[in-house]
Amino acid sequence: MPLNLADIGTEYIVKRISGKQEIKQHLENLGFVAGATVIVVSKVAGNVIVNVKESRIAINSEMAQKIYV
């Protein structure tokens, strides 16, 4: 399922990243790689704040839809 549909406070494993190569590279640079653990901290209007690799990162709904957990 896409990350923007994930439940708050639940730990998930990133399965894959979809989209163009430049988007994939950007998300990989932020720590969203296959096998990484992510926890959704909060959601506002589809935008999410997640814990990934001991950092909090805010991403918009379009980017969150490209991250499958």
Image (cartoon, rainbow, N blue to C red):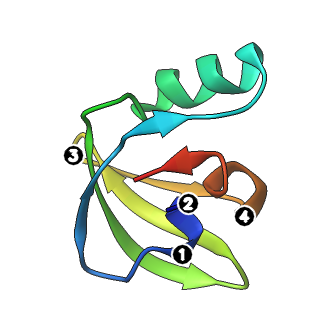
As drawn, the label of residue 2 is: 2
Measure the C-alpha gap from mark 1 to mark 2.
Answer: 6 Å
Measure the C-alpha gap from mark 2 to mark 4.
Answer: 10 Å
**Residue flagged by tag 2: what amino acid is it?**
Pro
As drawn, the label of residue 56 is: none
Residue highlighted by disc 4: 61
Q: Earlier in the sequence, mark 3 or mark 4?
A: 3
Near mark 3 (Cα within 10 A), the count class, few <14, some 14-19 or many ≥20, is few
Measure the C-alpha gap from mark 3 to mark 2.
Answer: 21 Å
User: Is 7 situated above or below 61?
Assistant: below
Q: Earlier in the sequence, mark 1 or mark 3?
A: 1
Residue highlighted by disc 1: 5
Instruction: State the residue at coordinates (56%, 31%).
Output: 27
Q: Which x, y percent locates residue 39?
A: 29, 64
Near mark 1 (Cα within 10 A), the count class, few <14, some 14-19 or many ≥20, is some
Q: Which x, y percent locates residue 61?
A: 72, 64
Residue highlighted by disc 3: 54
Q: Which x, y percent locates residue 42?
A: 46, 80
